[in-house]
Amino acid sequence: MFRGRLASWDAIILALTVVVLVVASLGVPNFGTSRNFTFLVLDLMPIALVALPMTLIIVTGEIDLSVASILGLASSLMGWFWNNGLSIETIIPLVVVIGAVLGAVNGLLVNALGLPSLAVTIGTLALYRGLAFVVLGDGAVADFPFTYTGWVTGTIGGGPVPNVLILIVALAVIFGIVLHATPFGRSLYAIGANDKAAHFSGIRVARSKFWLYVASGAIAALVGILWTLRYSSARADNGSGLELAVVAAVLLGGVSIFGGKGNLPGVLAGVVLLAALQNALRLQDVSGQALNIVTGALLVLSVLLPNLASSLRTALQRRKRRQAVTS
Amino acid sequence: MSPLLEIRGVSKSFGAVSAVQEVSFSLVAGEAHALVGENGAGKSTIVKMLAGVHRPDTGTLLVDGREVTFTNPADAKAAGIAVIYQEPTLFPDLSVAENIAMGNQPLTRLRQIDRKTMNANAVRLFARLGVHIDPARPARGLSIADQQLVEIAKALSSHARVLIMDEPTAALSGVEVDRLFAVTRALRDEGAAIMFISHRFEEITALCQRVTIMRDGKHVCTEPVSDLGVDDMIRRMVGRDLSALYPKQEATIGETVLEVQGLSRAGVFRDISFQVRAGEIVALAGLVGAGRSEVMQAVFGVDKYDSGTVTFLGRKLKPGNPRASMTAGMGLVPEDRRQQGLVMELSIERNVTLPRSRALAKLGLLFGGTERREAAGWTKQLQTKFGRLTDPVATLSGGNQQKVVLAKWLATGPKLLIVDEPTRGIDVGTKAEVHRLLSSLAARGLAVVMVSSELPEVLGMADRIVVLREGHVTAQLTRAEATEESVMYAAMGAS
């Protein structure tokens, strides 16, 4: 039953994604062009990458809302380091390590002190964004070397496939293997469904969750770097509100907000669905505010629909049985 | 006498599993009626249909001879049916009186809650039950027995005429059971119909007039208790003759496996010392709350302790580290299998292989087939009944869930197995199987520590008995020295 429900939810999302892609290709001018494909991939890159560790965190029943602020702080730091004469080859690993440390702070507050992750990461959401403005103020740093900015916006052999797709696929495969084919991944589901039983089974609950926050911080910082290079602009407000889109995509992908359920292929479908919808609407000159409405509505629907679907199914089963009995 | 409540040809299935098939019986006023059967026989499903939680697929429920349909628990309550569960569900931060009045609070003329009347009602109800509980105190901190009495008072306040008691005595001490029975008998004699579910036959013969026996979701018989002996009841429940419930095998006692020395934890237990040797079954006996589970959880490492040492296979164990204990060869089948033993939403195979997933991985990777083979092997060996290995473990009956917990720990190849209330809430048939399993494991050299509140189980299975009272060891008895009297004497103290 459990497996059936998941499979059917995956199928719904996949079907919906295909429908959106087909309808948009036919109905929205310029949607189906190779140039727009490049932009679509570049647009979904931040959501897709941040959604990878977020999926693992939500599977354990926790959440990390500070990711977009870590992204912004990483962008600010990158600009500040660049202004202070560090080489880009030093800046990139340095900023990723700082992101991991910011994630570790979340991880320690949640796991060593046992605080609720929702409260902790709302706190660091404000804190890290504030620090981003302390570092760089309202200004922007723009003069990054073209070797790097060009790689991020460029495509493989000048074709339609952006270079960053390699990165997305590679990281998705790594996170997919960790979640679905390692003892660590197995333990995350057990933690999310019943952390006490996981503890009684010799699983190191707090330590496992701690490392997920570290990974989340490092990936968010990496995305901050990519974001900065893509727009050639280090700003403190980069990526504001991205956490909402990421959480929406993860839940849309069938991961339970209560933990213990969900898989990564579903999440990737959720990411594509959300990004394609936003891209198509943007091509139709829909405003940014309206895009937020779409993201918000999808978030609510992704929580609502599985509930509706399962109660509908039980109602249908009951009716079927009644008919079988009376006939 | 016309029945107060009747169920007629009721069936209920969940997916492909048929839980109850064509069951009919009735409850009459002034009667205590026992419902017995092995775990998975369908008793809980019957209770849930009467409580309005589940709706029958076919068949009818009749109250006072009129057909009724319950779409939710409120309907059942309105029809005068109240259910007392094994673990009552009171609001811990509300007062006892508020809990009793929940849902139909008396109001003053200003539509405020009338606390005076509410408290007076509670006092009146407790007086009727002949018990003393302060209605103004919060429900938090009440013993399970007192919580059940509050639930009964709540049932009376809503004028319930049918009282369904689902294994109410499982977590009660002897004195508390006596008090519960006195209250129940009084209600019965006032004209209520009682449905009583229990695995303890002495309670059924002490309280009930008639008994309905179920097996595999079907109704076997309904007869006066006096016409059936305990042996008869068991035979009809399991559909076969039971070999001895406690098949103790002879084992050669070997080297010391576990040595606990002066283990203490402030306010919970102090200065606990005992040894367990290979091939030996050591029982930890005592009353509920004596600290037995807490000691064994500290030994395994899921809980902490303040001082003392745990030496396992000649090496000191790190405190508070269940993974180290597990790797060293220790397993713990915990008391509460729903909260501590199993991840209910996960599949049977994932639960079986959970502690072992690191050992099963190749190059750090797990392949579904390895886990499935492992789980299939162990569930087969323990004769676990299930649909598919990928079904959530929550779909199994209690006895089969317990087998999954046992499989999970036996799969780790332990040298010492701690079992905490290994047969609580499971049926006689499975109980005997679990006993046979533990006995044969010990015969093959496994050291076993068994925490149990059931004296027959302790006396029947243990080579040695360590008795705890209020957090310290009051006696260590050999199999030859142990009698019900000597164990109870040590457990209750000199009184």
Image: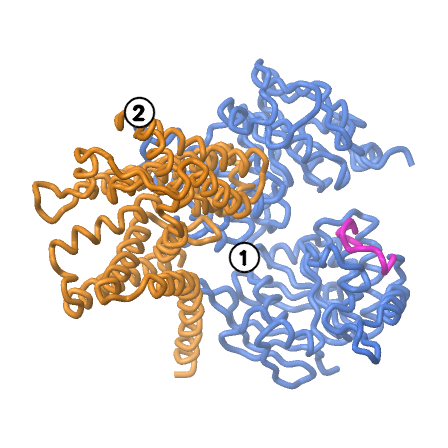
Chain colours: A orange, B blue
Q: Residue at the spot x=67%, y=54% of the render?
A: B199
Q: Mark 2 points at which residue?
A: A86
Magenta stretch, residue numbers: B134-146
- Compared across the picture, whether B96 is left or right of B308 comes to right
Circle 1: element type: loop
Provide the chain ID for the residue under circle 2. A
Q: Which of the pair B437/A79 is nearer the observer?
A: A79
Kindly identify the residue that appears in the image at 25 percent across and 39 percent down: A229
Q: Is residue A147 visible?
A: yes
Q: Is residue B178 placed above or below B157 in the rendered structure? A: above
Residue designated by label 1: B40
The residue drawn where x is 72% and y is 29% is B465
Q: Give yes or no for contact between labels 1 and 2 (Cβ–Cβ under 8 Å).
A: no
The residue lying at 63 percent from left, 32 percent from top is B303
Cα separation, mark 1 vs mark 2, equals 69 Å
Locate residue B389, reporting x and y percent: 39, 48
> What kind of secondary structure does the magenta stretch mostly adopt?
loop
The residue closer to the viewer here, A59 or B145, is A59
Quadrant holding the C terminus of chain B: top right
Q: What element carries label 2?
A: loop
